[in-house]
Image: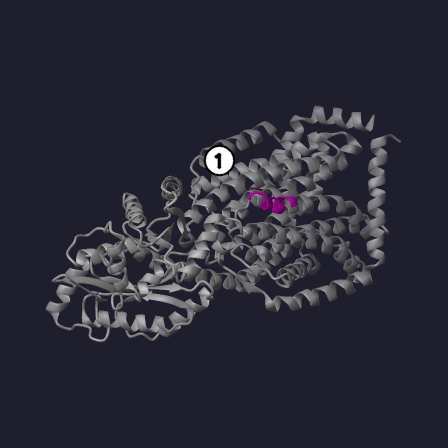
């Protein structure tokens, strides 16, 4: 016997020995699975949720570290913004509501500072004297219409109030609270909302800011885990029932995936990790993907049982072991590719734990499932009479006749699809706005709409200034920087201690500018000592301060402009007297976008290369490896084309679809090619081998496509828009990948039949 035949024979013998060993320890296997399931299932009770996307920034990111330190040193860097909208802000009723809200928020543990119209600092001058007080006396809110009209005119005359605390049209106002760095942000938001839920207010109340967004993300993640996963379980079960027409065809695959989910979620909890925006979809992925392996095992066992062979179960498991292992390993490679180039540790965690979950599914499919089958004799007796439904057999025969028809027509159709998809790829957008993650009727969307249309936005941008805060040179540098910031339309207002010094200098009648005399600055400074606002602008030792502003847009071009211009500016204007650094959510959003593109490129390249090499080695042919990758390659083009055509952007969730498509979509081609090679080695007839492969593995592929598509389509019920997009795209790509495996791949095999025969005869030396 020639070397190749010996290698194939040796591989089969090795698999037979493994299968025999698995069946021999079946009772021990079941006991161990039950014990491990109980152990890890118990850990799930401690599973926590962490929706903080920015909290998963890498530890060595300079902007993230500076952002965190500013929060610690200046009373918090994240804002909870309560928006109040009514007929007129400058009415007694509305201002009284502002006072009540301000007082209520002040009492919440974890709040550093609260700023509103009823407690904001106001600097006035008269006859050379300075009066530092409040814009409105919260204990004596004016009720006279003339006094209120004068108050409105005065407030609109100052940039500190107009557009920051009160809208230009006078119908909305803000109460802005800073969250302390060590506080639990979501708990703080919940306390505020609880305190204000019974507020008697005829207008509208809004909650905005990053902590509010994170709380909504947490609530939505919990909702999805409780609601989406059960729906996925039911729908996938229905697809399996349609495909196999038997209880065993449903119970066995779903039992393995449920156990795999319990193990994975329990492991996440046991290792101290939390559910995130991404890891919360792991149960759905494991249901859709993990059931696929069991589908192929059950399908092959049913086929062998029909032959009434004595050791049908053993032969079935042996025959399906290699393609199932190959399919799962390529899927694992697809998810592990997220480790490379990921800016957020959240994406890496998603890739690692999903890969572990798939490994659990593989282990259970090849060890636990055969153990169950071998114990329950009832299954053996009835399996011989079980086949896939007539509907599935009809579809299988349809694809067989289609694939063996005119391959030129098939390739032409696919070529047209590819051309249209390439056009769609040129239209892909990128988006990193967390607000875009919510539906239009969500309070985050509505609140952000108010903040962006009537105010200066809610995304903080900081420039840290290091130097003597009472030095004229440093204060002049601050004002110069603020002038630089003002030239950008998306930064309508900024604030620093230099503004307060200017106000003080103007109040004594010397003009709106920072004095050049340090002694005079110190005199003005002394009158500001003890004011709450000072703790938000300078540190205790007066050798550091910040310029703070809000950005009213998340447009990527704007974020790019901010990062490029401000980092250049701070470097060029730093010297021995003053040193500058820039940070803020806009900077981190821009880096998040860069990481999305980087992750997409890295993960796709790594996944494609590893899959081609892996498949080529295991199938003993580089040509086979290239042919196997054709369906998934075309599917990737269709995937990105669909995103461009439908307007779905690349974001933190959809960026994962490429590698997921490679990992899952390659399974169909692997199972088809494995069966094709098995048939081809016997008859060297491409057409007969294609027909045999479709009739054998095609049924399992069709059932698999239905179940995986339905499993991911369930994400359309999610309350998070990115997960809806993710579910839709994966559902589309699974259909495309399955169709490509059953039509385009056979067409490619027919066109290369001459090279295939030559290659096989050379290897087998026939």
* Quarter of the image with the N terminus in it: top right
Front in this rendered view, residue 527 or 731: 527
Number of numbered callouts drawn: 1
Mark 1 closeness class: few <14, some 14–19, many ≥20 residues within 10 Å:
many
The part of the chain drawn in magenta is: 333-341
Magenta span includes 337: yes
Residue 157 visible in the picture: no
Q: Which residue is mark 1?
A: 421
- Residue drawn at x 62%, y 51% is 352
* Quarter of the image with the C terminus in it: top right
Residue 119 visible in the picture: yes
Drawn side of residue 576 relative to residue 476, left or right? right
Secondary structure beneath label 1: helix
Q: Position of residue 259 (x, y in %)?
A: 68, 61
Q: Main secondary structure of the magenta part?
A: helix
Magenta span includes 169: no
Drawn side of residue 721 relative to residue 600, left or right? left
Drawn side of residue 560 relative to residue 652, left or right? left
Q: Position of residue 317 (x, y in %)?
A: 78, 50
- Residue drawn at x 64%, y 36% is 609
Front in this rendered view, residue 623 or 60: 60
Image quarter of residue 757: top right
Q: Is residue 92 above or below residue 23?
A: below
Q: Position of residue 621 (x, y in %)?
A: 73, 31
Image quarter of residue 30: bottom right
Front in this rendered view, residue 18 or 506: 506
């Amino acid at each position: 016997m020639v070397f190749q035949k010996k290698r194939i024979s040796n591989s089969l013998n090795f698999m037979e020995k493994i299968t025999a060993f698995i069946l021999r320890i079946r009772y021990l296997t079941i006991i161990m699975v039950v014990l491990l399931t109980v152990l890890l299932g118990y850990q799930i009770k401690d599973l926590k949720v962490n929706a903080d996307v920015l909290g998963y920034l890498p530890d060595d990111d300079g902007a993230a570290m500076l952002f965190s330190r500013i929060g610690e040193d200046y009373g918090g860097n994240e804002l909870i913004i309560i928006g109040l909208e009514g007929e007129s802000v400058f009415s007694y009723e509305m201002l009284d509501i502002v006072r009540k809200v301000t007082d209520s928020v002040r009492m919440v543990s974890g709040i550093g500072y609260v700023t509103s119209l009823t407690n904001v600092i106001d600097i006035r001058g008269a006859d050379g004297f300075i009066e530092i007080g409040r814009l409105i006396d919260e204990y004596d809110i004016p009720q006279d219409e003339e006094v209120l009209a004068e108050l409105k005119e005065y407030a609109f005359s100052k940039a500190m109030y107009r557009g920051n605390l009160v809208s230009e049209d006078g119908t909305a106002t803000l109460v802005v609270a800073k969250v302390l760095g060590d506080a639990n942000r979501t708990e703080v938001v919940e306390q505020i909302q609880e305190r204000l839920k019974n507020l008697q207010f005829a207008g509208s109340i809004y909650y905005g800011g990053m902590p509010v967004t994170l709380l909504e993300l947490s609530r939505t993640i919990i909702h999805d885990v409780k609601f989406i996963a059960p729906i996925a379980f039911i729908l996938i079960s229905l697809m399996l029932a349609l495909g196999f027409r038997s209880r065993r065809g449903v119970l066995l695959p779903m039992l393995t995936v449920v156990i795999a989910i319990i193990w994975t979620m329990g492991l996440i909890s046991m290792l101290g990790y939390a559910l995130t925006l991404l890891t919360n979809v792991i149960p759905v992925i494991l249901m859709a993907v993990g059931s696929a392996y069991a589908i192929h095992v059950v399908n092959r066992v049913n086929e062998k049982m029909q032959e009434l062979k004595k050791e049908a179960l053993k032969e079935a498991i042996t025959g399906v072991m290699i393609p199932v292992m190959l399919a799962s390993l390529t899927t694992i490679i697809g998810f592990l590719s997220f480790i490379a180039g990921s800016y957020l540790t959240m994406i890496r965690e998603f890739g690692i734990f999903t890969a572990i979950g798939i490994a659990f599914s593989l282990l259970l499919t090849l060890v636990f499932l055969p153990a169950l089958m071998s114990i329950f004799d009832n299954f053996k007796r009835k399996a011989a009479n079980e086949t896939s439904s007539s509907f599935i057999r009809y579809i299988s025969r349809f694809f067989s006749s289609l694939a063996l028809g005119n391959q030129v027509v098939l390739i032409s159709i696919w070529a047209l699809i590819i051309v249209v998809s390439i056009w769609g790829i040129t239209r892909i957008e990128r988006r990193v706005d967390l607000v875009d993650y919510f539906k239009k009727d969500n309070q985050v969307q509505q609140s952000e709409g108010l903040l962006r249309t009537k105010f200066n936005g809610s995304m903080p941008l900081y420039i840290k200034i290091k130097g003597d805060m009472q030095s004229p040179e440093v204060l002049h540098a601050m004002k110069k920087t603020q002038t630089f910031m003002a030239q950008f339309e998306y930064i309508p207002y900024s604030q620093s201690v230099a503004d307060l010094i200017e106000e003080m200098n103007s109040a004594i009648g010397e003009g709106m500018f920072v004095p050049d005399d340090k002694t005079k600055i110190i005199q003005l400074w002394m009158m500001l000592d003890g004011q709450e606002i000072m703790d938000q602008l300078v540190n205790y030792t007066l050798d550091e301060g910040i310029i703070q502003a809000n950005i009213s847009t998340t447009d990527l071009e704007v974020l790019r402009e901010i990062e490029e211009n401000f980092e250049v500016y701070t470097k060029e204007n730093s010297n021995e007297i003053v040193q500058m650094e820039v940070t803020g959510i806009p900077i981190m959003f821009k880096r998040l976008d860069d990481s999305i593109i980087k992750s997409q490129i890295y993960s796709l390249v790594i996944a494609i290369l590893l899959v081609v090499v892996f498949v080529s080695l295991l199938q003993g042919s580089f040509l086979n490896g290239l042919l196997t990758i054709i369906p998934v390659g075309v599917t990737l083009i269709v995937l990105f084309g669909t995103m461009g055509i439908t307007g779905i952007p690349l974001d933190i969730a959809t960026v994962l679809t490429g590698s997921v498509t490679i990992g899952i979509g390659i399974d169909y081609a692997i199972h088809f090619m494995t069966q094709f090679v098995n048939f081809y080695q016997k008859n060297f007839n491409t057409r007969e081998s294609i027909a045999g492969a479709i009739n054998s593995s095609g049924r399992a592929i069709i059932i698999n496509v239905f179940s995986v598509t339905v499993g991911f389509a369930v994400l359309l019920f999610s309350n998070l828009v990115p997960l809806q997009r993710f579910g839709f795209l994966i559902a589309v790509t699974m259909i495309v990948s399955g169709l490509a495996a059953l039509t385009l791949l056979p067409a490619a095999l027919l066109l290369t039949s001459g090279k295939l025969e030559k290659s096989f005869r050379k290897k087998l030396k026939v």
